[in-house]
Amino acid sequence: MDSDFFCADITGINPNVMFELGYAIATDKRIWLIRDESYSDIKKEFDQLRLLTTVGFSPYVNSSDIIKSFFTESLHLTLDQTIFRQSIEPMLSAQTESASLLYLKSRHDTEASVRTTRTLEDSKIPIVISDPKETSIQPLYWYAQRLWGAIGLVTHFVSHAREGFKIHNARYALISGLARGSEVNTLMLTEQSELLSPMDYRDALQDYTTPAEAARLVEEWLNPIRLEAKQIIDGKANYAKALRLATELKDFHLQLGDYIAENESARLEEYFVETTVSADVINGTQSVFVGRKGTGKTATLLHAQSVIEAEARNIVCLVKPVGYEIEGLVRLFAGYKLHDFKGYVIESLWKYMLYTELARAAVQQITQSALWELVDPDSKELVDLLEDESRAFSGDFTVRLEKAVKSLEVLPQVESDEHFRRGISEALHSGELGRLRTVLNRVLKKKRKVLLLIDNLDKPWTRNADLGQLAEFLLGLLTAANQIGAEMNKGDKERDGAKFHSAIFLRSDIFEKIVDSASEPDKLPYMRLKWEDSELLLRIIEERYIASHGAGSDPAVMWRKYFCPHVKDIPTREYLTERILKRPRDIVYFVKAAVSFAVNRKHDRVEEKDVLDGEKQYSQYALDSILVENGITIPQLESVLFEFVGSNAVTSEDDVRMLVSRADVSTEKVDEVVDHLVKLSFLGVEIENEVFAYSDEPRELKKNKVLSDHFVEQRGGRRHYEINPPFRSYLEISEK
């Protein structure tokens, strides 16, 4: 604490050094990092770490280089130029809307990770989640903002035996050190004491050997957190006021909120941009909604939930499974040789799960906000059924699914269709379920509208999962939801009862696998979330401005006041939408990044350089996002993408194939990888002279391929591809 500056050699990505670095940043120390540039593999690891891209380092090969760098940079004369003061303090807010707990999830959805998540969610403490499956890394200031006023931090490290452990653990150690330096109560979970644990954070590091032990450690850590939350909130809020830098641009940055909808649930309704998709969810005119990450699936779901729940006579059932018992499902489905038998099992399993989820949602509404309904015999009977722990309906979604799968696994194989169906019915407690359905139907008939929302279905969608079985399982969900809707709305022609409908949100790549498994794919109606209208994207920023400045505010004033008029001779509003993937998450990320650079530089508006630097930061995020979306498809995709560094924006087919093959992709797989890059919108195909088309929708992709084939035939020569603008800045793509 008494030192003038902090120096560390980061040649090796060591989690202990990363923790100390995070602590030094939070305690406002001048930072000086050095790195031996002669280790090429270490350089790659440093680039993958990414949290330190704005921190910088001094390269060296020997001690003379270190001494020379020290005196050249004159650290002893610039002690006030700390990372905290320059990049973090300007972003801190005196406004703490609600103290929350920051949770850094494990890189892998192990059983311990699932139980840890479930324990934290059950605590009812507001949680902000950083999930590597959603985005691989956030900027350093993002973590600092979330820790400011936080009531705790939980970081879940991974075993040294698991893929990607080194970079994952180094990042989490850095953030844990940042939390410790910010005096935030921290729990660092790890498997079997595999991390070195110096004295200064040994008390925060907890190792476990079983999933149950991990959940117990979290629960024990949470107990004092619950009791001390109010004191922590008050203390942080008072301290924050002393550091507040009340510039208008800084306030504007804060008012933009977060780019991840889950972290903005408390404010979302203030500035939600309504679309035809959100209207379809609320009105029930469509039931399956498909989109890439960041296209607003979760925001649309949260908006629909808020709108429907605003009416006391409505009920919303939200199903967001934390994870599935995948191995059990695969074993179960593999045991059925007849496709009809498997289809019946899946359909029965989903109907059992959904009916019990609807019943639990109805009981929760009655017991938490409508106790007066207990005078109604049907409502009281439903509550009694659900509160009886001896019945099969107790436990959350994942627990009940695991129980149901295990009960179905032990059924003997029979040839008779009648005996088979009877066995399934008995295993799923058809007698009790029948009674539950009858009572539930009577209760829901007294409601005005019932909405079943289903999300979070991508969690088990990993490279090692049996994707064919999972696709069939989710296809069964679509069928079961439709059947339940028909059963619930039976006899409801005159709206003399419940108006039931469901909305299921699926990631694009998952839906395509489901379509492949369907016997009649053309009979799967769905709505795709698209944001092709640039003005609609800009409204996402403008609505956030209006929400904080009042209904009469003019967004045009915002653009004039806070942004330079042009970037590279292009109107700024146009430039922002041209350089991103067309998704709400991306426009918010890009604008916030540009504004944060302006705030750090004490600018009174966002200048061209701020936009360009923000673009580079966003470009890295865009690249990370398609790596996350790739997930299960191409293991070496990151290596493939980095082969394009320094390329021209427009590249011939031969050059693209050559770059892909250089990433150790076998010759027979090259075309498949190129097609995948097009599908991810990394590459666009030329369909007219210097006109390139991008799409992730299967039909559009086929159409673009045909148009490109025709164009190549007419022009002669080889096909050309274009690297999408969002990825160019980070990969240093030449646009000449």
Image: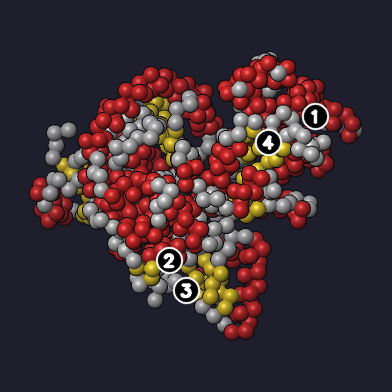
SS at badge 1: helix
Percent position of residue 311, x then y: 60, 34
Q: Residues within 10 Å of mark 2 (few under 14, many from 20)?
A: some
Q: In the picture, which quadrant includes the N terminus?
A: top left
Q: Position of residue 361 (x, y in %)?
A: 63, 28
Q: CA distance from mark 1 to mark 4?
A: 32 Å
* Residue at 56% across, 46% down: 300
Front tag of 4 and 3: 4
Task: Name the residue beneath numbered marker 3.
Answer: 650
Q: Which residue is mark 2?
A: 574
In the rendered image, residue 203, in percent from the top left (x then y), is placed at: 32, 24
* 208, above or below 638, in the image: above
Q: Amino acid at mark 3?
A: Val
Q: Amino acid at mark 1?
A: Ile
Q: Quickly name the residue at label 4.
A: 449
Q: Tell me: residue 386, above or below residue 523.
A: above
From the image, state whether disc 2 or disc 1 is nearer to you. 2
The nearer-to-camera label among 1 and 4 is 4
